[in-house]
Amino acid sequence: MSMKLRDLIRKVRACKTASEERAVIAKESAMIRTAIREEQEHYRHRNVAKLLFMHMLGYPTHFGQLECMKLTASPHFPEKRIGYLGMMLLLSEEADVLMLATNSLKNDLNSEIRFVAGLALCAIGNLATADMSRDLAPEVDKHLKSGTPYLRKKACLSMSRCLTKCPEMVEDFVERVVTLLKDKSHGVLITVVQLMTQILLIDAQTYEEEGYDDISETPCRIAFMRLVPVLVKLLRNLLSMGYSPEHDVGGISDPFLQVQILTVLRLLGTGNNEASEEMNDVLAQVATNTETSKNAGNAILYECVLTIMAVESEDSLRVLAINILGRFLLNRDNNIRYVALNTLAKCIVEQNNREDGGQDLANSAASALQRHRTTVVDCLKDPDVSIRQRALELIYHLVNQENVEDLTAELLNYLVLCPREHRADICTRVLRVVDRFSPGDRWRVDTLITMLTIAGRETTREVQSATIVYISRAAEDIQSYATHKLLKAIRDDDGTQLGLLNVGIWCIGEYGDLLLKSYTYTPPSSSGALMEVTDATNGDIPVTISFMGLEPSAVVRTVEDVTGR
């Protein structure tokens, strides 16, 4: 006789090596196979429970799938429960034996015991195939009208699976969803809103195949658009609801339902001005009244921000959303900061796509993003590498004509500290920023030479070639400045920065005659150039840059020295 589940767990935990554990499992698996062959019904539920434990440990358990089917047909609830649990964990929707369960599921759906019907609904929600969905959808629909909230909420989730597998049935159940939205139970409401979300996603995937010119013309969306005022009222009631022990999570009234409602509002308001207008006020209310001291409140605010940025909201509301993400950046929880940086990057991309020429930038979301620039730059100093990488991505999006010099200086500072494997990508991105937003040829050349000095070893041929092209196209004054500076840089380098050496030797070969003349340059006080051009002790007071003229023999000796290292 095989051992009990408790004894198997103790025996596995007592194993000191992986080989001992494998031996225990192999022995027990052999005994379970023997019990299956001998049709030992009395121990069937115990054997399936042990198979579930083995499955959790990662061992093969496919030989017990048929035992699960037999347990689901048992008249006893404990055995039926183990059978359904085993079926949901040990089987996938591709398993051939799953078709054998259709009749058993149909019988259990019609059971007078609600817990038995609940088990069947759970199994359908996890495993239903397209054929099973068509066969069982009428039985699931009966439970959508059940008088028990326990069954109604499970039926909503099961129907979500059925409609995903059979999108052609969506229109038949839209009106049922409209009716269920008036339910009093919060558990049912959450699942109904989830079902609405799934229907909208299915609708968005299939509307093009049906030939609609506009997604808002689909029957499902037209029916759900009428529910926007109901959803807004429901969300407003949750915000004004007093303390309720049954639904309170961290001082927030049912945050799960609030998040689900905001998700549906986002799907309905995207590209629809009328629906967006109806939800603007409640979105502002959520954004201003939700408590941020607990994670539940932060989850609602995050979903609210996503909704505001997706729908056709007012610009003042977008600014409010950006400011919420700015507050997230000051949070000590790295998860919240990571989410904020990620979302800000998406927001600025969307804002760039939406921006019109006549928009008042002082009050726009883009302007609000720029106000959080310092906070984002501070994230580059975070010890968590994932936070630094997200901040880096966001800084690339924040760069514009006005702040290019400051942000490029921050990128070059980060280039000194970042891991070597990230340097090539950063150099390429800095090149794009310089190419697009450079205020002048001298600043562009100065920036690229500084970058080569820091990370010349990791720069790609693209960056090196671009630097040479920019120098060759510049005026003679800048060519003289670049050549003198490159000669000094390769002379001071230890020979490891190959990219700097390539560019430097090329420039000396092309413009070596300029090294024979002295060079002097005094930048204007408002240039805001890189740190090398400005004396740190004198603030913004410009410092004259001077290079002495060299003898030809000195230039040759320098080149021979650096190439011989």
Image (cartoon, grey):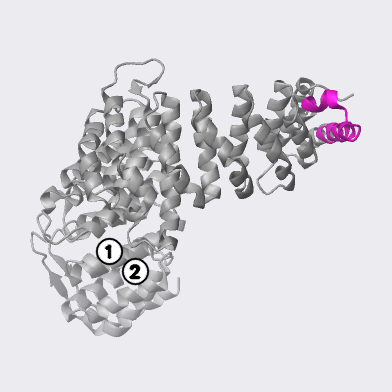
Residue 433 circle label: 1
Foreground tag (2 vs 1): 1
Residue located 83% across and 35% down the image: 29
20 and 217: which is toward the camera: 217
Judging from the image, what secondary structure is the residue with disc 1 in? helix
Q: Which residue is mark 2?
A: 491
Quadrant location of the N terminus in the rendered image: top right
The answer to whether marks 2 and 1 mark residues whose Cβ atoms lie closer than 8 Å is no
Q: Position of residue 210 (x, y in %)?
A: 43, 61
The amino acid pointed to by label 2 is Arg
How much space separates mark 2 and mark 1, taking CA atoms? Answer: 28 Å
The part of the chain drawn in magenta is: 25-46
The amino acid pointed to by label 1 is Val
* Residue 239 visible to an observer of this rendering: yes
Residue located 54% across and 42% down the image: 161
Is residue 352 covered in magenta?
Answer: no
In the image, is 354 to the left or to the right of 172?
left
User: Local crowd at mark 1 within 10 Å, few (<14), some, or many (≥20)?
Assistant: many
460 and 161: which is toward the camera: 161
Q: Earlier in the sequence, mark 2 or mark 1?
A: 1
